Every structure is written in structure tokens, then in C-alpha cells.
Amino acid sequence: MTEPAQKKILEVENLKVRFSSEQGSVFPVDDVSFSLNPGEVLGIVGESGCGKTLTALSCLNLLPFPGVIETGEVWFNGDDVLKLNEKKLRHLRGAKIAMVFQESMTALNPVYRIGSQLSSIISMNRKVSKKQAKALALDYLTAMGIPGAEQRLHDFPHQLSGGMRQRVLIALALACEPQILIADEPTTALDVTTQAFILDKIRGIQASADMATILVSHDLGVVAEFCHRVIVMYCGRIIEKASIQKIFTEPRHPYTVGLLNSIPQVRQKVLHRLQIIEGAVPNLHDLSSGCRFANRCSQAQDRCFREEPFLSGSGGHEVACFYPREVQ
Ligand SMILES: Nc1ncnc2c1ncn2[C@@H]1O[C@H](COP(=O)(O)OP(=O)(O)O)[C@@H](O)[C@H]1O
Ligand SMILES: [Mg+2]
């Protein structure tokens, strides 16, 4: 007997984002499809400029001007998010799907105290009294390791360091008890120790609330610690999808192999020189017809410069490469 397919909490299908300017149109997210299971933590990785943030923002129908969604569907609870009206979208953002951005200064309102921002958002999104909202605000700040959290409630955003503001933002997102948390490089601006602490706290709350999570990061090391499954993006495309274990033990795309080789291995006895992937992500205005990674790929052959490979595979491991790394 085959098991019934697990109901997905989010399904993104054939998403394509367009930016048009005088130089023409570019598609920084190009035919991206993925899904998220309830309680799952999905990582989106790739170098800067690969389309990770735009993919995340599209899930909330929140693209920056002049970006538009050219085609695609984003299914959440039986609704296509891309077709919801403004009122329904406002209800969705924060309460159902919360997002933590990397830029903490712009995400908080400079003229309101931290405590009142937290409790008013909690009151808006949860059925609690004012007093309970205040108590919850304090609980979440404390859980995020903010020293003197009670006094901090009276501070304005500019009185906090960047790291503290980032913790407040994460507390804000989690306190709304969203069904999905999207964290876009939530700890990139922080030092390594704080990063580990905060990721650990998010993971604790994520696991106890069984909250589906998308973690966006340029760092495969961070994703390894946190995620069940990973999608690897390159230049607007998904080039590999697999469980975290498969990505680490049997990476198939040369780009994924390159990303893995650039992670420092602390436990390694001999210190090897870290390998970097030569070259840079191509300009979206001058993409050729072949594989977008071909000009940086040591395995590339003639066909790779002529034709573009698309995702294929089985057992939940898919790769877009004509000559993927063989697995034993
Ligand atoms: N506001 C914008 N206007 C024009 N192009 C943009 C804008 N935002 C992003 N892009 C284009 O989309 C690409 C992908 O952006 P983004 O999703 O932010 O990448 P990532 O999060 O992976 O670093 C960028 O390299 C850029 O070419
Ligand atoms: Mg980004």
C-alpha cells in the first residue's frame, strides 16, 4: 500500500519574477517550484544575487518595485497568495506567514518603543488581552537572550545595537505564532557566537511549535545545522534539491560541490586551503542559451554551452546538470 501524500503547507509552482528597465527585462527568479511540509525546515542557499530573497518575498506577494510576478502560483491553505486582495494579504503577512529580514533598522518603527511595537503586533495577531500581550512580549525578548529585557521594552529602536534589534525582529515574528516563518539571512550581520545562539533559539521554538520554516542563507554551513531539506539556487534557477543528508554526502551539481568545498571544516586534522568557486554569477542581461553555471564549471562540456539542463531525478533528489557527479 502506498502512503498517502503528505499535505503541503506551501506550494510554489513555476514562479517567474520580472524586472523591466530601459536595458530590457530580466528574470531573477526563473521557473522556480518547491513545496514545504508542515513542521519542515527548508533551506534556500546560493551565492548573493541568485534570487533567494526575491523567491522568499514572492511567497508573501511582496516584491520591491518594479518587480512583478510574470507567472506562477503560491498555494497556502487553499489560496493562491498571488491572487489575494490587499485585505487578505494583510491578514496573511505576519499572522500566518511571518518574515524576518536581514535589515533590522528599516523593519522597526523608529518612533515607537520596542515594547509597544511588540505588544501591539501580538494583540493584532493573537486573541490575548493587552496585559497578556505585554507579558508575551517580555517572554519572547527574554527567550531571544536580550539582557535586561524588561528595561529594553522601554527603549526606542535606535537605542539598541544592530544585534539586539535583530533579536527583537525575530521575537516579533515568533510571537505572532505564524504557521510559516521565513527567515532571510536572519543572522548574517551578527558575530558567529550570537548567530549560533539565535539559530538555536529559533530552532527550539520552531520544533516545539512544529512551525514550518524557510531559512534563506548564502552559507551552506548554517543550513546544515538547521534544515531538513535544501534547495540550491543559481542565477534564478533551482539547480539541486535534496535532503540535507544527501546534499552533504552525495552532492551532484558541480556548483553544490563548490559551495560545500568552501565551508571551513573545523574537525579536519590537516588544515586544507578552502576552495572558492572561480568567477562570478553572470549578469542577468547577458545570459547565453546554455547552462548558467557553464562558464565557471570545471566539468562543462560543449553541450553545456549550447543547451540548458532542467531539474530531474528521483527519490526527492533532483539536479539540473547534464554531467552530474556520479554517486556510488
Ligand atoms: N529592486 C530591484 N531592482 C532590479 N533588480 C533587482 C532588484 N532586486 C533584486 N534584483 C535583481 O535580482 C537578483 C536577485 O536578487 P535577490 O533575490 O535579492 O538575490 P539574493 O537574495 O540571492 O542575494 C539581483 O542580483 C538583481 O539582479
Ligand atoms: Mg538576499
Image: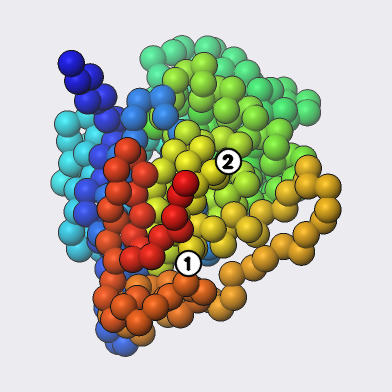
Q: Position of residue 235 (x, y in %)?
A: 40, 67
Dots 1, 2 in contact, CB < 8 A? no
Q: Which residue is mark 1?
A: 49
Which residue is nearer to you in this view: 326 or 228? 326
Q: Is residue 125 left or right of residue 84?
A: right
**Any mark on residue 323, and which?**
none
Label 2 residue SS:
helix
Q: Which mark is residue 224?
A: 2
- Decide if residue 17 is on the left or right side of residue 123: left
Q: Is residue 318 above or below residue 77?
A: below
Q: What crowding class fits label 2: few (fewer than 14 Cα within 10 Å), some (14-19), or many (20 or more)?
A: some
Residues 276 and 252: in front is 252
Q: Is residue 116 visible?
A: no
Residue 96 location, quadrant: top left
Residue at 36% of width from left, 44% of height from top?
317
- For marks 1 and 2, the one nearer the N-term is 1
Numbered disc 1: secondary structure: loop
Q: Percent position (x, y) of residue 114?
A: 62, 35
- The location of residue 315, given as percent across then percent down, is 32, 38
Pointer 1 residue Cβ closer than 8 Å to ligand 1: yes
Q: How is the image coloured?
A: rainbow
Q: Amino acid at mark 2?
A: Ala
